[in-house]
Image (cartoon, grey):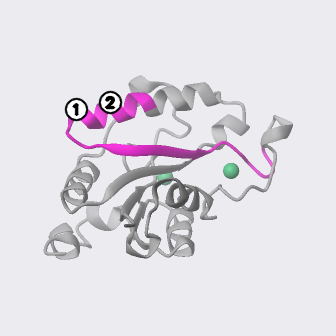
Amino acid sequence: MKIKAAFFDRDGTLIEDENYLDDINKIRIIPESLNICKVLQKKGYKLFVVSNQSGIARGFFDQEFVIKTHGYLKKLFLKKNVYFEKFYFCPHHPTRAIKKELLINCDCRKPKPGLLYKAAKDFNIDLKKSLMFGDKLSDIDAGIAAGCKSFYIQDFLNNKLDLKKEFYGK
Ligand SMILES: [Mg+2]
Ligand SMILES: [Zn+2]
């Protein structure tokens, strides 16, 4: 049987946007987002992160740093009883990459749905029953392109959307 997933953008959605986060000490979880994770986890959604990390392509930090950061984040959320199955990220940029191999018009940089497709394949996810949360149009477009119901996190942060109304009783 296929599983249902909730995909989360990382910067500006799960944690405060630090504009190319390059230091794990700067990580600050957004409390309302943590709460959304808890609610959806309870509803049987498996949680994933899908993140554009063009800071790698731009040479601001390396891939190892991002992997280390995600290991740290996974533990941090686990301490709050939230389990992320996997962190997917795109290291590319179509024009700003300083490394040749990362200078590509890839299929995984949001708004393209490549990261969500990859997760769907790896974990047998039913994308039509899945959700995407992000703070930018590119997140929403990636979610929609993959067939997920997609939400701006801001709509929950400023109470335009009600967590209970959207997800309780479903
Ligand atoms: Mg973001
Ligand atoms: Zn990519």
Q: Which residue is mark 2?
A: 75
Q: Are marks 2 and 1 in contact (CB under 8 Å)?
A: yes
Report the residue at 65% width, 55% height from top: 109
Residue 124, percent from left and from top: 46, 61
Determine crowd level at label 1: few under 14, some 14-19, many 20+ residues with C-alpha closer than 10 A: few
Left/right of residue 91 with respect to residue 162 in the rendered view: right
Report the residue at 70% width, 59% height from top: 107
* Spatial separation of the CA atoms under disc 2 and disc 1: 6 Å
Asked if 29 appears above or below 36 in the picture, the reply is above
Left/right of residue 22 with respect to residue 54 in the rendered view: left
Q: Please report the bounds of the magenta region as a residue range.
A: 71-96
Residue 113, percent from left and from top: 59, 64
Q: Which mark is residue 92?
A: none
Q: Which mark is residue 79?
A: 1
Left/right of residue 167 with respect to residue 90 in the rendered view: left
Quarter containing the N terminus: bottom left
Quarter containing the C terminus: bottom left
